[in-house]
Image (tube, coloured by chain):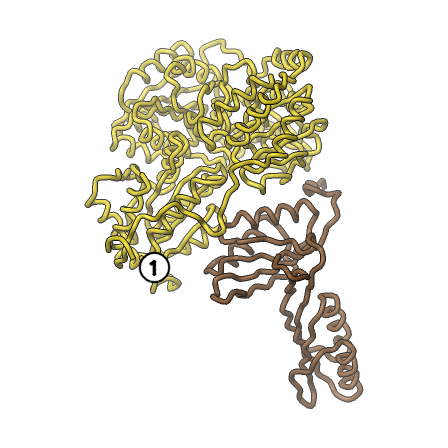
Amino acid sequence: MAVPKPLFPQEPSERHTLSILVDNEAGVLGRITGLFSARGYNIESLTVADVSADETVSRITIVTSGPRRVIDQIHAQLERLVPVHSVTDLTELGPHVERELALVKVAGTGEKRVEALRIADIFRARAVDTTTRSFVFEISGSTAKVDQFIELMREVGLVEVARGGVVAISRGAEAR
Amino acid sequence: MQGRELTGAEIVVQALVDLGVDTLFGYPGGAVLPIYDALFKQSRIRHILVRHEQGAVHAAEGYARSTGKPGVVLVTSGPGATNAVTGITDALMDSIPIVVLTGQVATHLIGTDAFQECDTVGITRHCSKHNYLVKETGRLGDVIHEAFHIATTGRPGPVVVDIPKDVQVAKARYARPGPIQHKTYRPRVKGDRAAIEAAVEMLAAAERPILYTGGGIINSGPGASQLLRDLARLTGAPVTSTLMGLGAFPAGDPQFLGMLGMHGTYEANMAMNQCDLMLCLGARFDDRVTGRLDGFSPDSRKVHVDIDRSSFNKTVRVDVAIEGDVGHVLEDMVKLWRARACKPSATPEWGARIAGWRAKNSLGYRQDGPAIQPQHAIARLFAATRHRHPIISTEVGQHQMWTAQHFGFEKPNRWLTSGGLGTMGYGLPAAIGAQLGNPDALVIDIAGEASILMNIQELGTATQYRLPVKVFVLNNEYMGMVRQWQDLTYEGRHSQSYSDSLPDFVRLAEAWGWKGIRIDTADALDDGIAAMLAHDGPVFVDCRVERHANCFPMIPSGATHTEMLLGPEQVSGTVDRAAEALV
């Protein structure tokens, strides 16, 4: 059966990290996430927290993916929202730092428990909770590093994972 | 803090007065009783009691479109707000400035599933330009002023202000705020100079230019329409318009190609396809305009002027994008064109090609015999009223497209139709709003028999306020556009598109105190129209037209501008699945 073609079928998908400063007011997160769902944009990761001294401005970091034209649309659509102060496409901007935090619970005894500790050491993960049968590791780093750590932990007794989502900021002295 | 101490309800009324509001469309209910009491005690604002909240919003839209001033709506919580949602969405899609004030249950009851509670800000978040839930009476005045600022500037749109009942009752000081300097919302008005220079150079170098104009010109104000005429004159470029933009350029001007798009003229669509430079002014490359995207104007360079940056490259890639108010950008382009003493760039060869397409007479129809062709009815109505520059509203469907094709608009703000959302039931309340804003104008809702029933209750509103609105129904006993698509796509299987059990419209209108007229045959048409115009009160005309006429020309689903159907003989009755899936 013939299926209608997507709008920009020939254009490759790109992953972009957007940093959005918004008024810290009720419903603002709903405006942002609703915009993404209403227009069919992807959200791979979303984090939000107040970042101002007087609790008036929050930073939302969104990792999204799509053809370049869709990314530009997302940027323009976000800027249209009244409580949005600024939208920065960090991927477009260039040098920036991205970090993700995860808490990873692993259970096991004997050689598996030792192996879990060894891997954690290599990844510079910290044990923040322990019993004789389990650890909770705190790991931070790029999304790829966190993914890789979790994959390895599967082999040595992964129980559950909590991830914080990507936070990102531009390099250098200036606020962007 | 400065100002007088007032109740929240009094602040609402005083803020509206300070904002110059003279007309308010609404319907009372429990959660807005304090505001209705405050309205009772004053005489500056006229409240128009509609019969359904959807009608209030469309009436406010009609008022806004025909006057250029924002329309204002007041409804209660719960069903009052949800009934308004269709109108709010309509205003968003067509960029119409309205402010909708909704009552809400008291703040301590929010979230408890209280009587007539709904999450109004949640429901309207994505169908409004912006919305507010006001939880403190002290904020109410500033929020209402800000709401008007946001509704009327930038790309206009609907703004919702949800006001809990306790906030209406509590007291606070109110003072009229100064000019609003919003901390994040700063729409750009002036276009980028370098981009405008590039656009003028491209226009001057073009051989086959076209001006593709939209509702942005109307929204920018009458000055933009004048500047469009100036630019067209200076460049010699032909002008086509979207449905929303009709009236911005005079329909009778030789440079006007008529409307473009799905039911546009052959010459407009062919010129869009064959141009070498397209200047898009306040339009947004809607799917009804472009047809199939990969065949849309393949050989042209494109310049897009829009106040909304998100309109650029949304579906069609453009070479130059100019963000700004189209009136200001047109002014800069005209000045630059004159300063550089550019010559009209459209070549005689381009003019000859257009004349060739025009000769197809794609809007032609044959009126013979007693049955009234719907196009003929519109043409006769136009001929009888054109000297009065009437304000025309429509519902949605075949009658809307025939009106766009056969009624010529010479001025902006005379044409009120639901374009983006395509809302049946829009026309009658919009006509009521327009008549209130323009008491001396001739206002006609050209309707279909199915659409008019969607907000027929508003006949009572016109009666109550003695509004001499005219309703001219092209009655073909079908949801004609649905049936037309069934003819085109489903081999004529007319599933649920017959208007069964219609009322006797003449008696229905008379029951509401209107004059009712029925026109059955072509020889009675002119007399019927004359009788309608001669009556100084509201008139409902039930014009029985040829039942099976379809609207041509037409670009079918999934086709390009060059693949127009010019008449019923080109209809095959089926399309492939990919085209069927497109709307």
Residue B326 drawn at (x, y percent): 53, 32
Q: Give left or right: position of B260 versus A121.
A: left
State whether residue B156 is above or below residue A167: above
Quadrant assignment for the N terminus of chain A? top right
Q: Give left or right: position of B56 versus B90.
A: left
Residue B259 drawn at (x, y percent): 55, 23
Which residue occupies 55% across, 40% down?
A: B308
Residue B559 drawn at (x, y percent): 67, 29
Chain letter of disc 1 in the image: B
Name the amino acid, label 1. Answer: Glu
State whether residue B444 is above or below residue A144: above
State whether residue A94 is above or below residue A107: above
Q: Quadrant of residue B135?
A: bottom left
Q: Residues within 10 Å of mark 1 (few under 14, many from 20)?
A: some
Question: Which chain is drawn using brown?
Answer: A
Q: Does residue B125 show up?
A: yes
Closer to the camera, A80 or B422?
A: A80
**SS class, disc 1:** loop
Which residue occupies 43% across, 29% down?
A: B416
Closer to the camera, B246 or B265?
A: B246
Residue B521 drawn at (x, y percent): 41, 13
Q: Give left or right: position of B363 versus A168.
A: left
Question: Which chain is drawn using yellow?
Answer: B
Report which residue position mark 1 lands on: B136
Q: Give left or right: position of B515 versus B338.
A: left
